[in-house]
Image: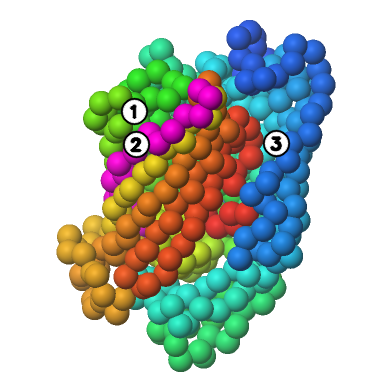
């Protein structure tokens, strides 16, 4: 184990050295939209952080600092305290990732919630087995980006630390949970595999690759966006928790004439366990309403995840030529797996109590309808609302607010892995 850790030091040194070099690079033409020419600050308000059924009543605000440390750099301090969940973010970007050829992003995030749900592991978990878990998390990450091929290809290595603390885990003897889920809760409280409960700290090292053939921004209407990412996670508090994570996705746009087009997405997440202990549920791929409208929050957790979606997007009105309002309808199919390559089945289960076997896991369907609003002269901000329904009978409303600071601040009330 000691040899493994010492072997990682040259890789970390190379990554950090490259990031320092990117920070020192020229920053001409790399400004964020709306940034002033001189150093300054301004206040941002996040209206969608004021209330939700899961987090309760709250507020959201942030302070942006322009040209901090170098020209065109930007820093952000944001907080969203709420009744059941509190979130704080600090981030710094050496340049705008949407304009610069090279950039460095440094981010830190702290979260606490007393409404982290656990339904059990795998695609067969029951909605009646939901248990509330109180948990805290702190994540620090450094990313360095380099564009190639006229900004079509992006290479982004990253390194980070994350700490998770589980303050309340309910009894693993709950009869509504299957045996694998009960065993997992016993693991969280076990001292044999290290201090997963109450706290667990790990080191992440990985790389993301993106290839984009879509038409030029601000609003592309054709092309394909390919994403691939690999990450190695090694626990610093327990030598038994080690894993690799592979994420692959493809998003495509097909024009149908005017502002009408089809948007399709296919994504795969695959986890390979390298240690003796299984991966804690909050580090696994998750499937819920944030990715598939109609599913409950934190609904399914597994080692692997597969999602397919098709949306038809169409224009509605554009009052005064300033605000554009469009609609979308979509079909979705997704599931989680212990091993997607051996368990995935092409059939779709329209019944909530669909049979799930060790070798055949059907996809769960959902349908959605929604609205999208934005300014005609900018890609962001853009408000996206989706109303979805699934065989479980759960109708979910999803709000998403995209902003020009999204590279610095992920969605505020999002505690789990994406």
Which element carries disc 3, helix, strand or loop?
strand
Dominant secondary structure (helix, strand or loop) of the stretch shown in magenta? strand
Residue occupying the far right of the picture: 40
Q: Which residue is mark 3?
A: 91
Q: How is the image coloured?
A: rainbow
Pointers 1 and 2 in contact (C-beta within 8 Å): yes
Is there any visible trace of residue 261 in the rendered image?
A: yes
Among numbered discs 1 and 2, the one appearing first in the sequence: 1
Q: Tell me the mark number nearer the camera, choosing from 1 and 3.
A: 1
Among numbered discs 1 and 3, the one appearing first in the sequence: 3
Q: Quadrant of residue 95?
A: top right
- In the picture provided, is 18 more to the left or to the right than 37? left
Q: Nearer the viewer, residue 156 or 110?
A: 110
- Give percent across and percent down for residue 4: 53, 48
Mark 2 vs mark 3, CA separation in Å: 35 Å
Question: Residue at image x 81%, y 17%?
Answer: 39
Q: Nearer the viewer, residue 62 or 305?
A: 62
Magenta residues, as a range? 303-321
Which element carries disc 1, helix, strand or loop?
loop
Residue 236 vs 349, above or below: the answer is: above
Q: Which residue is mark 1?
A: 259
Query: Which of the image's four quarters has the N terminus?
Result: bottom right
Among numbered discs 2 and 3, the one appearing first in the sequence: 3
Mark 1 vs mark 3, CA separation in Å: 35 Å
Pointers 2 and 3 in contact (C-beta within 8 Å): no
Q: Quadrant of residue 168?
A: bottom right
Q: Which residue is mark 2?
A: 314
């Amino acid at each position: 184990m000691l040899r493994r850790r010492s072997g990682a030091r040259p890789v970390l040194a190379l990554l950090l050295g490259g990031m320092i070099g990117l920070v020192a690079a020229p920053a001409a033409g790399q400004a964020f939209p709306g940034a002033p020419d001189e150093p300054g600050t301004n206040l941002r308000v996040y209206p969608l952080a004021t209330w939700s059924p899961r987090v309760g009543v709250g507020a959201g605000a942030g302070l942006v600092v322009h040209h901090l440390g170098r020209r065109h750099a930007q820093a952000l301090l944001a907080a969203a305290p709420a009744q059941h969940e509190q979130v704080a973010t600090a981030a710094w970007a050496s340049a705008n990732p949407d304009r610069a050829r090279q950039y460095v992003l440094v981010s830190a995030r702290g979260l606490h919630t007393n409404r982290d749900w656990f339904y059990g592991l795998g695609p067969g978990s029951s909605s009646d087995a939901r248990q509330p878990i109180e948990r805290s998390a702190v994540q620090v990450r450094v990313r360095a980006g380099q564009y190639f091929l006229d900004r079509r290809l992006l290479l982004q290595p990253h390194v980070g630390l994350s700490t998770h603390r589980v303050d309340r885990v309910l009894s693993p003897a709950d009869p509504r949970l299957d045996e694998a889920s009960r065993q997992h809760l016993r693991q969280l409280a076990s001292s044999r595999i290290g201090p997963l409960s109450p706290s667990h700290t790990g080191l992440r090292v990985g790389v993301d690759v993106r290839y984009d053939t879509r038409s030029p921004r601000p609003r592309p209407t054709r092309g394909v966006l390919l994403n691939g990412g690999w990450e190695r996670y090694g626990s610093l508090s327990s030598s038994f928790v080690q894993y690799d994570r592979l994420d692959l996705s493809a998003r495509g746009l097909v024009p149908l004439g005017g502002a009408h087009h089809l948007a399709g997405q296919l994504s795969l997440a695959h986890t390979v366990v390298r240690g003796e202990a299984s991966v804690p549920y909050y580090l696994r791929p998750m499937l819920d309403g944030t990715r598939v409208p109609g599913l409950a929050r934190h609904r399914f957790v597994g080692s692997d995840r597969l999602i397919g979606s098709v949306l038809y997007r169409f224009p509605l009105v554009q009052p005064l030529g300033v605000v554009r309002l469009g609609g979308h309808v979509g079909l979705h199919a997704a599931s989680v797996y212990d091993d997607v390559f051996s368990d995935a089945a092409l059939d779709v289960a329209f019944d909530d109590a669909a049979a799930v076997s060790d070798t055949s896991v059907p996809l769960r369907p959902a349908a959605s309808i929604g609205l999208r609003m934005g300014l005609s002269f900018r890609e962001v901000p853009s408000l996206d609302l989706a109303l979805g329904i699934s065989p479980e009978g759960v109708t979910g409303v999803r709000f998403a607010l995209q902003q020009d600071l999204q590279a610095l601040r992920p969605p505020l009330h999002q505690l789990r892995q994406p």
